[in-house]
Amino acid sequence: MKRRHYSGITLIEMLVSIAIASLLLLITLQVISRSYVNWRRESTRTQLQTNTKTAVETVAQVIRSAKSVEAQNSQPDSHAPNPENPYSWTSATGSGATLILAVPARDASGNIIYIDATHTSLYTDNVIFYLEPNTDILYRRTIANTVAPNNATTTTCPPAQSTPACPPDSKVVADIANLTTTYLDASGNVVASPSGTEAVRYELSQTRSIGSQMFESSYGTTAALRNK
């Protein structure tokens, strides 16, 4: 009688196969992980650049619509920096400076509200762009002119003190590393005060870290006041 021989995988062959499969899996996972890290870095860089540009253009759009830059807010703000002085917002040039703009007041239809029938002067609201130093967030506050008839603008308040009647200030952008405001006259020369300002140079930098890598994005633009 002939003895039958059965062929199969030995234990050693199985262990070798498992080791090879594990190595291939490890290499694949490393490739995927490296690709994900690179994608995340590029995504962060792109998002940061987009956020920086969008924030500056948001401010520039308001500058273009403004009548003037003001040294102090002309509309009283009960949440101004100095609680005892509702006109204590101060506009200045330089790093981290607050920007105060007098923007034409508008009714619910978007029409500018004029003071006189000949349309030579108009009512203005205040739009204030300020940097919150504790959080490095740029906010936009709006102070409505309560004297302007049919003014559709709503005054805003600090986020922590907002109410249904006074919604929170708008968050423009976070992660700010540097913010610079420069005032220019009609010839493009730098002026030290809001008086005589015809255009504003607004520059902003952001930083954000992913792991041990730091990303930075900067953008600036010059916007002229068109409602002077």
Image: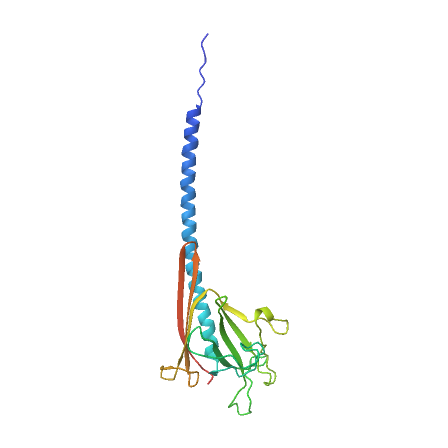
Residue placed most toward the observer, 88 or 197:
88
Residue placed most toward the observer, 64 or 83:
83
Task: Please identify the quarter of the rendering in which residue 84 is found.
Answer: bottom right
Residue 16 lies, in percent from the top left, at 41, 29
Q: Which residue is depicted at the point 43% across and 47% down? A: 33
Residue placed most toward the observer, 221 or 177:
177
Residue 64 lies, in percent from the top left, at 45, 78
Q: Is 52 situated above or below 79?
A: above
For the question of whether residue 221 can be seen, the reply is yes
Q: Which residue is depicted at the point 40% across and 52% down? A: 38
For the question of whether residue 9 can be seen, the reply is no
Q: Is 174 situated above or below 97?
A: above
Residue 1 lies, in percent from the top left, at 46, 7
Residue 136 lies, in percent from the top left, at 48, 67
| Picture mark count | 0
Q: How is the image coloured?
A: rainbow
Residue placed most toward the observer, 134 or 47:
134
Q: Single out the residue that lies furthest toward the right.
A: 164
